[in-house]
Image (tube, helix red, strand yellow):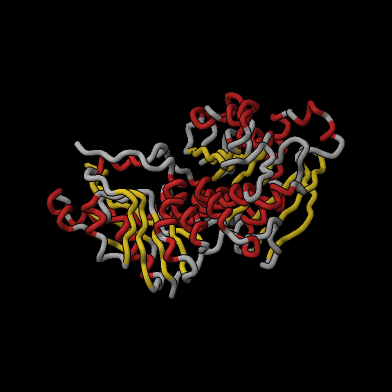
Amino acid sequence: METAVAIVEDRRDAGGELAGALAGLRGEDAVVLGLPRGGVPVAFEVARGLGTPLDLLVAGKLGVPFEPELGVGAVAEAEVSVDDESVARDAGVCEETLEEVEARERAEVARRSARLQAVRPEVPVSGRTAVAADDELAAGSIARAACALARAKGARRVVLAVPVAPESAAASLEGEADGVVVLAEPAYVLAIGQVYRDFSQTSDAEVLALLWESLPAETAPASSPAPRDRPGLDEEVEVVAAGVHLAGKLAVSTEAAGLVVFAHGSGSGRHSPPNRLVAGALWQAGFGTLLIDLLTRSEALDRSKVFDVELLRRRLGEATVWPKAREERRKRAVGYFGASTGAADVARHGAAPGAPVAAVVSRRGRPDLAGPWLTEVRAPTLIIVGGADDVVLRLNRDFGGRLVCRNEPSVVPGASHLFEGSGTLEVVAGLATAWYIEHLAKEAP
């Protein structure tokens, strides 16, 4: 059997090679559109090599229920649909089943699009040359849907660029795109992965990090809370919990889809720049926020109280049912954002019977402080950890395995324990916003 010899190190290396093959597009009014997830590292390097903007084309394969790897078409945003009727007919897939599969995949495409676009504005495509880039091309239905979506967005010309594709698939797409650029064309589909030395899975966090890195400095979102330009509350508040007066910051518009309560880590508080940045992103996305200091100033100097998770859990619960928060909860679902030791407070409170929590995000959490309570958490939980934060990475390694609720780990590439790297906090904000859009907004009355 003929197989392809590895020609590139990984997807980014492949993107650099593709950029060279597409050099004729330099200086042209173009935009590079990556297909998430694996196509985005490829597209990032193509865009950097050509000096063009980077954006996404979100599409999904229609897999036969009894054989998911067999594609009978694909769907994309903007109601784009591509069906392979002959494959569906040969596989014995009836029209009713195909409609069910398409409806399910459209919902998944919408979810992924909302999650991955949370970190940045959409790049205009109309009137430009669109370079649709992916990491490989197998059956070709997703590529056809991507080309159709680029045209639906108003692209003047569509070029499909992939590092590797079987000869037959590449030839079949010449009518779908104005140009097809392929680095390697193995005779067999099974040989595609052999073109890469590293073909490991790409995460949502990596996609968001690359999208952020590709933004010109003058168009990057502000690294500070958004202006409170909608009607509603925006005020410093005093929360009474167990007779103790705690300082907080409440911002919630009249139409907010949900209320996110922040529990800070040791040595931090409601003025924490990282949490304020996340709160600003949530405000822009239509959520209300309550940033609360669970300890008084004098208590924050007492290490025994800083790590008293049960005390902090009780105060977090009482802050959530504090009169103004309770008034907001009458119309909105509640989510929690926990940072460092605050994530343990959130886990303990979320595990309490009757706790009003619809979604949880943990940033650099300390699951070791939550102990056996982790198995009682029921709310969907997103676990965000920095890729360069070795200690907390180890602590969170079995976090998801101990949770019985829906959970998802997300490692932000290059982020330290303080998330100091350029764009890393914006990636956290994007991941958190998308999680609340998916799990908190839908719980709103």
Which image quarter is the N terminus in?
A: top left
Which residue is pictured at 69% across the width and 56% down the height?
A: 223
In the image shown, does 288 or 153 lie closer to the viewer?
A: 153
On the rendered structure, is 3 left or right of 113? left
Location of residue 204 in the rendering, given as x and y in whole percent from the top left corner: 49, 46
Q: How many marks?
A: 0
Res. 245 in view: yes
The answer to whether 257 appears left or right of 72 in the picture is right
Image coordinates of residue 295 in percent, x first then y, are: 79, 38
x, y (%) of residue 439?
50, 49
Q: From the viewer's perspective, is residue 344 above or below residue 154?
A: above
The vertical placement of 432 against 256, above or below, is above
**Of the pair 203 and 264, the residue shown nearer to us:** 203
Give how far across and how far down residue 242 sits, in percent.
Answer: 77, 37
Residue at the spot 38% in from the left edge and 66% down from the top edge: 150
Going 62% across and 51% down the picture, which residue do you hit? 426
At 22% from the left edge and 59% from the top edge, which residue is drawn?
A: 172
**Residue 2 occupies quadrant:** top left
- Please tell me whether residue 46 is drawn above or below residue 269 in the rendered image: below
Outermost residue on the top side: it is 372
Position of 94 compared to 151: left or right? left
Classify residue 241 as left or right of residue 197: right
Residue 327 visible in this rendered orientation of the protein: no
Task: Tell which of 45 and 279 is nearer to you.
Answer: 45
